[in-house]
Amino acid sequence: MFDEDQGLYTIGTVAELLQEHPETLRVWERNDLIRPDRKGYQRRYSSNDVRRLKFIKYLMNEKGLNIAGVKHLTSMYFCWYKQNCKGGATQNSPVPVNESKACWKIEGTYCLVASDKAEMCNSCAMLRSCSGCSGCNT
């Protein structure tokens, strides 16, 4: 079975695929928007990394966000760096979706509504930076 999180593509291949300069991808990596695997000094991008990069490009080019805006927005996706993210669903799906939050993985779908509050709390930047916090209190 194909692992969508396995780093397969070089920076040159991904840059060509996205029609971006390789340095742009390096800048996005330095700003923690993307975390490709490393094999020695060589970056290896997975299929999910390419999807993330397409979403980043969409947010910048179509929505007009800068790097700080993209970083802030993607921090609200609990699954941004999660392996084996299943992706979203359409509005007509029997599964509840958040229609205000486009899925980064599957174009034209929306993020699923978090099924438990711990999932939402684990993605919260405030909780991660809080010293002595024991978890979600809501």
Image (tube, rainbow, N blue to C red):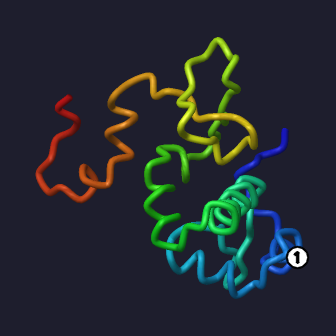
Residue at figure coordinates x 62%, y 60% from the top left: 63
Residue at figure coordinates x 52%, y 73% from the top left: 67
Residue at figure coordinates x 55%, y 40% from the top left: 101
Which quarter of the figure is the C terminus placed in? top left
Q: Is residue 127 left or right of residue 54?
A: left
Query: What secondary structure is marked by label 1?
Result: helix
Q: Is residue 14 left or right of residue 25?
A: right
User: How far across and how far down the image is residue 33, in percent?
Assistant: 55, 67
Count all numbered tags in the image, as a single digit: 1
1 up-or-down from 66: above or below: above
80 up-or-down from 84: above or below: below
User: What's the amino acid at mark 1?
Assistant: Glu
* Quarter-of-image position of residue 95: top right
Q: Report the residue marked by disc 1.
A: 16
User: How far across and how far down the image is residue 134, in percent?
Assistant: 16, 41
User: How far across and how far down the image is residue 108, in percent?
Assistant: 74, 38
The residue closer to the viewer here, 31 or 36, is 31
19 up-or-down from 125: above or below: below
User: How far across and how far down the image is residue 27, in percent?
Assistant: 60, 83
